[in-house]
Amino acid sequence: MKMAYHAPRPYMIDPTIMPYECYTDYGNPSNHALLTTGFFFCLFLELFHDLYKGKTLAKILYVPALVFVIALCLLVGFARLYEGVHDIGDIIYGYQWGLLVAFYFHLIIRKPLRRHIRRLTEKETTSPRLTKRKVFLYVFLSTLLFLITFGI
């Protein structure tokens, strides 16, 4: 996406801005804002609108968890502004894409993915059975590997 917009970072335009880090790629949208918003809102939607929906603890923690997710996303955006590597437009655009990704996964991808995982875990095959614990472990390890690979 950054290559499509070719939007320079603030320190590329204004020599008075002294960033803590210098990136050579373009700045729009902010990947930090996009990934933080997408991941944490997707996690929030999964926990409070599906797994624990209607349970007493979820009702009590709903608003604090939502405030925490919003505050975390805002802090990441503020940090990117403070470091001088993005302007407000880059961050807002990253938030928009992050919310789009979170709602896309929650509303469209989640049910077919769960159905596929259920088929894998319940199907009797000659290979060792893929248990829900193994699926969780594979998802956790692949997410960790992704985060380490891309340095997030």
Image (cartoon, grey):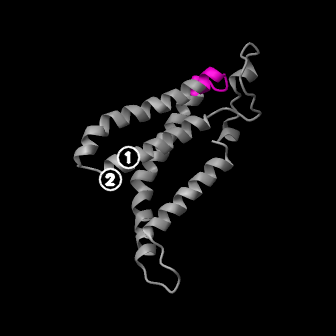
| Quarter-of-image position of residue 1 | top right
Please give the label number shown on residue 59.
none
Which residue is drawn at the image coordinates 39% and 61% (left, top)? 111
Residue drawn where x is 66% and y is 22% of the image? 84
Q: Where residue 45 is drawn, which disc sits there?
A: 1
- Magenta segment boundaries in residue numbering: 80-89
Quadrant where the image shows the C terminus: top right
Q: Tell me how many marks there are.
A: 2
Task: Please name the residue shown 51% across and 27% down the image.
Answer: 75
Q: Is residue 123 left or right of residue 89?
A: left
Seen in the picture, residue 70 relative to 149 is either above or below; the reply is: above
Residue occupying the point 63% across, 33% down: 28
Between 76 and 96, the one lying in front of the other is 76
Q: Position of residue 18 (x, y in %)?
A: 73, 18
Of residues 83 and 137, the one drawn nearer to the viewer in this rendering: 137
Which residue in the rendered view is the most extreme toward the bottom?
A: 126
Provide residue 51's location: percent of width, then percent of height: 33, 54
Identity of the amino acid at label 1?
Leu
* 98 within the magenta span: no
Q: Which mark is residue 50?
A: 2
Circles 2 and 1 in contact, beta carbons < 8 Å: yes
Q: Is residue 41 left or right of residue 59?
A: right
N-terminal of the pair, mark 2 or mark 1, is 1
Q: Secondary structure at mark 1?
A: helix
